[in-house]
Amino acid sequence: MSDSDNKSFFDAFMATAGSFSDIARMAPTVMMLRSDALMASMAEPMAFDSQESILMVSEKIAAVTEGAMRATLAAGAGVGLAMMTGMAQPNLAFKIADAAVEPMRRQVQSNYDRLTTKPA
């Protein structure tokens, strides 16, 4: 592997690791805040925000679907490039993983920002 291949491999690895790290850092806070809201609704059922419950399911389906589509496209592009150039793509697995995880990371970040920002 050349130095540029090593850098490309390392950059792809760090992008994937960064996405996983962001999810692992923010997801527990999002789950805690949503659980608190759910528990509070048991004491005050009329104050329950059903929109948040709908989001909990629909946003996951959308993120997983987008991630699967992006991973498939990244795999196809990587294999196509390897076939056209005759050169292996050592960072392809990380590019595929990052493509799959990025929509989930973006959604967790959006939830974290929304749930931790106090209304003015």
Image (cartoon, rainbow, N blue to C red):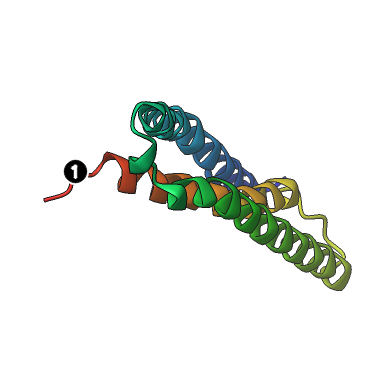
In the rendered view, would you say 81 is above or below 18? Answer: below
Q: Is residue 4 visible?
A: no
Classify residue 26 by image quadrant. Answer: top left
Residue occupying the far bottom of the picture: 84
User: Looking at the image, which residue is at 45% across and 53% down?
Assistant: 51
In the rendered view, would you say 15 is above or below 38? Answer: below
Position of 32 with respect to 17 (left or right) is left
Q: Is residue 35 visible?
A: yes
Assign a secondary structure to mark 1: loop
Position of 4 with respect to 85 (left or right) is left
User: Looking at the image, which residue is at 82% across and 55% down?
Assistant: 88
Classify residue 45 by image quadrant. Answer: top left
Give x and y (percent) for residue 110: 40, 51
According to the picture, the residue beneath numbered tag 1 turns out to be 118
Give x and y (percent) for residue 8: 60, 51
Classify residue 86 by image quadrant. Answer: bottom right
Q: Quadrant of the N terminus?
A: top right
Q: Which residue is nearer to you in this view: 26 or 85?
A: 26
Specify few, some or many for label 1: CA neighbours under 10 Å numbering under 14, 14-19, or 20 or more.
few
Give x and y (percent) for residue 20: 55, 36
Q: Which residue is nearer to you in this view: 64 or 52?
A: 52
Q: Which residue is nearer to you in this view: 74 or 48?
A: 48
Give x and y (percent) for residue 83: 88, 68
In the rendered view, would you say 44 is above or below 105? Answer: above
Number of callouts in the render?
1
Residue occupying the far left of the picture: 120
Position of 59 with respect to 116 (left or right) is right
User: Looking at the image, which residue is at 74% across and 47% down?
Assistant: 93
Q: Which residue is nearer to you in this view: 119 or 81?
A: 119
Amino acid type at circle 1 is: Lys
